[in-house]
Amino acid sequence: MKKEWKTANPDGSVTVRTCGWSPPGDHPVGCGMRLTVKDGKLIGVEGDEEHPITQGRLCPRCLDLPEYVHHPDRIIYPMKRDPKDRGKDKWTKITWDEAWDIIVPKIKQLKKDHGAESIVVFGGTGREACLYYYPLGFASIGTPNVCYPWSGWACYGPRCAITDYILGAGYPEVDYAGYFKDRFDDPNYVLPKYYVEWGKMALYSNPDGFFGHAIIDMMKRGTKVICVDPRMTWLGTRSDTVCQLRPGTDSALALGFINVIINEELYDKDFVENWTYGFDDLKERAQQYDPETVEKITWVPKETIIDVARKISMNHPCTFQWGLATDENPNGVQMGHAILSLAALTGNLDVPGGITLGPPAALLGKWRVETRRNLSDELWDKRIGAKEWPALSTALATTHPDETLDTLESGKPYKLRMGWFNSSNFLTPTCSAQPMRWYKALKNLELNVVQDTFMTPTAMALCDVFLPLPTFAEHDGVVVTHFGRNCVTLGAINEALRCGDTRSDIEVCIELGKKLHPDMWPYENVQDFFTQQLKPELGVDWNGLAEMGVYQPKYTYKKYEKGLLRADGEPGFNTVTGMVELSSTLFEAWGDDPLPYFKEPPYSPVSTPELAEEYPLILTTGARKPTSFHSEHRQLSVLREIDPYADVEIHPDTAAKLGIKEGDWVLLENMFGKAKFKAKLTPIVHPKVIHAAHGWWYPESNGEEPNLFGVWESNTNSLVPHKHIGKLGFGCPAKQMICKATKLNSFDEVTVTVPESYKPDVKPEVLEAEWKAAKIASPGSSPEALYCTESSEKVAAADIGVEKLKVSVTVEKENIPAEVAGD
Amino acid sequence: MSANGLLIHYEYCSGCSSCVVACKNELKLPVGKNGITLLQNGPREIAPGKIEWDYIPTPTALCNMCEDRVKAGKQPTCVHHCLSKCMEYGPLEELAKSASQKGRKVVIFTSQS
């Protein structure tokens, strides 16, 4: 890329090269673009052809950036509101100093009177804040309670944790030749013969920084696609094979593939023999999942199961991408374990054209981990839910999300008193289950601070001090794919303009940090901060990165052979056994089955047949649209024109039976809640399955309570229960609930609001208890065979050394992997 | 000199709408007006388990094939920003040659009036 990143144009405008992140949101792809500014206005966005990955291409969200930056509703000055006016549009513009004068003494008082743990910092999904909300909590404020509120941490975190425990590596990603300057033409690169997209929509989601349309780049060169998805996606129509499975049965399907690959001896014998642990146990387990049985569970024909198993094992290399469906599933740890096992059995880990593995330490992760030094061991031990859920708290430096809601509601083990919402609008259907419960519980906090760009339902309902964020066009920063856990590119974000008086995440961290914990923030300014981060790892300072534009680290294949995955420099994987753990020593130590297994969704025609009579449709949610990032972009006219309403996809046959026509408003309802969606009749969903869009609110409607910009009207997460999580604390059933659908005569026929007397309903808790106690039968086999059996004592601790196991299970502050961020 | 045109290899058009928004920026069009629009064929079931589903970006009467950009040596903005790189701009003869190597799902729009 050219060294010059800022140019003055003859007409007086200035063009600045940058790499995009957020806000407005996307994952950290760092798409290359040039922003042109004239007279304080962003007047042009043009994709940068020199960017090695995006090559000039941009999605509609970045192309509509000028509308976002200069939107009349944007908030560009700090504001305050009297806590007694929460929910009312009664804001007063203030200065940053006035904001700090409210916030800083309150934090000091809470720390003195109730302990720093009485403050909780909430982070959201995928935005740039993911790099900074942990340090904001640990080192600027000084609390151990940093919370990603989605039930079961159901976004990216589970996959990172599974990878840590099974592979002992950073994030596993499709090899799309991203590390190479000459990309697909590099002599060290091999094109995957098959790409398996599992529970993911990478084209639209750009997951975790993977540039989704790299799949199209690979398809044009000859890669074939296998889709595993309950919906026939557009990519599905371009695929070699589609496994259109029943929502939530993924682990059964993965075990079905494993069954065929092992029994037909199609696995990579050399890799299995030298680099895996527990093969014989997995082989035995897989016998329960023959293709006939799996067809009955998953609806995927047994011929397809056999065919796909052969394709992915007889064609090398082959690459896999596991999606959010892994996280949004209480059986997701087993699903993820099975998918990683498939990649291992087929010899596709850390090889050209297979799955790349990030090194164990995240790029720029050292600082993030080190900010935890600011907390005493005693304080760190107070992290909510950490002791109860060691599998979660060992890999993730946060609270347990469901426990956090319980603590908010019960005041146990202590009362939470202040909330800080960093780029998270989680009352909208994004990352909280039972958002009405969160809403009620968060109202009890004494002070709520929100950092965002627009007035959101979350801020309108709860906020007392609003701190405005600049867009990525308006601040300096870095964007690193996979939040550093498998860095393909690290790009410079360069400030092109600044509207009003906003402060970026890192600016707030430093400014607040200097007031409360100055020893943790020895940086003169943001550029100095980045220089100190970049110099040791990249050898360049802040300006050096800006001139470089994009840094591409070198990648080494087969790191496990070269001693590059383990801290001790020995060959192998950074796991307890040093191998890829097909049977997991840690899962067993934490009380789960060491091997993958299938468990029915908590509510389904199989697990709760009586409820399923009342709620006969399987509800899946969360598919991506290119015109929004979760709850963002709803106020942008250009993007709303393309995607105007929350929609529900219904098969035409099902719609006909229910008397629903294209464009009708439909009420979806189950035992936990209800919400309204516009009917979209389409054959891409199975007649028994419907898909409802997430992230919806209506910024054009009244913002004050009770309406709150219509946040409850199309809130998919109202239908998702609290704390229906897996045995290790991960996963929630957002993609495999049940519901019924009723035609409405108009949107206004039903108004969905929080009932006046609303308090946590006993009904969900009763159901929760029933679910936990339920004997869940699976079709075609004895229930016990397919249901989670209590962890066996087979993998004797003696095999691996009890001491070693204990060491790994103990939560050592310094040894915790660099924390991860939301999907 | 022969007329120019826009080739869409819609085998790969994922329906992202980048062309629509890029065009709106270039022509400074308000909501309700577009220089290029995304037509959808399907999704419809054509055989059991087989779905036909195509997005076909189609220039409207407002499209001027990005005269100004082309004069400045750039590609039309839809071509430049297309996430799938499934659009080409150039003389019709060259596009026809390119189309002949792209299978069934390809279409060419011309700038001829």
Image (cartoon, rainbow, N blue to C red):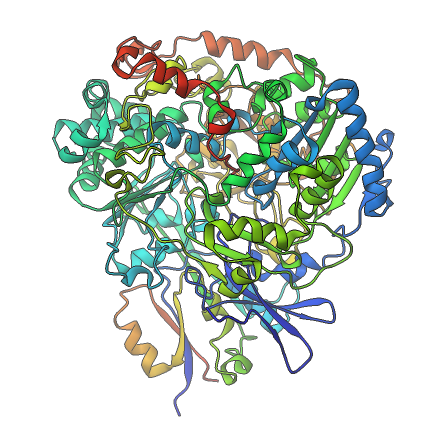
x%, y% of residue A775? 39, 8
Who's the residue at 36% across and 62% down the image? Answer: A181
Q: Based on the displayed image, in which of its 4 quarters is residue A580 positioned?
A: top left
Foreground pick, A324 / A705: A324
Instruction: Spot the residue most to the bottom.
Output: B1
Give percent across and percent down for residue A649.
49, 40
Above/below status of A687 relative to A698: above
Identity of the residue drawn at 69% across and 30% down: A752
Question: Residue A417, relative to residue A240: is it above or below?
Answer: above
Total numbered badges shown on the rendered structure: 0
Picture coordinates of residue B65, whole percent (x, y): 50, 78
Q: Is residue A58 visible?
A: yes
Q: Is residue A289 left or right of residue A78?
A: left
Along the line of sight, the residue nearer the viewer: A729 or A814: A814
Residue sitting nearer the eye, A771 or A139: A139
- Is residue A250 visible in this depiction of the protein? no
Q: Which of the 4 image quarters holds residue A140?
A: top right
Quadrant housing the N terminus of chain B: bottom left
* Relative vertical location of residue A695 with respect to residue A730 in this rendering, above or below: below
Can you name the residue that lies furthest to the left here? A265
Residue A427: x %, y % from top left = 66, 33
Name the foreground residue: A267 vs A579: A579
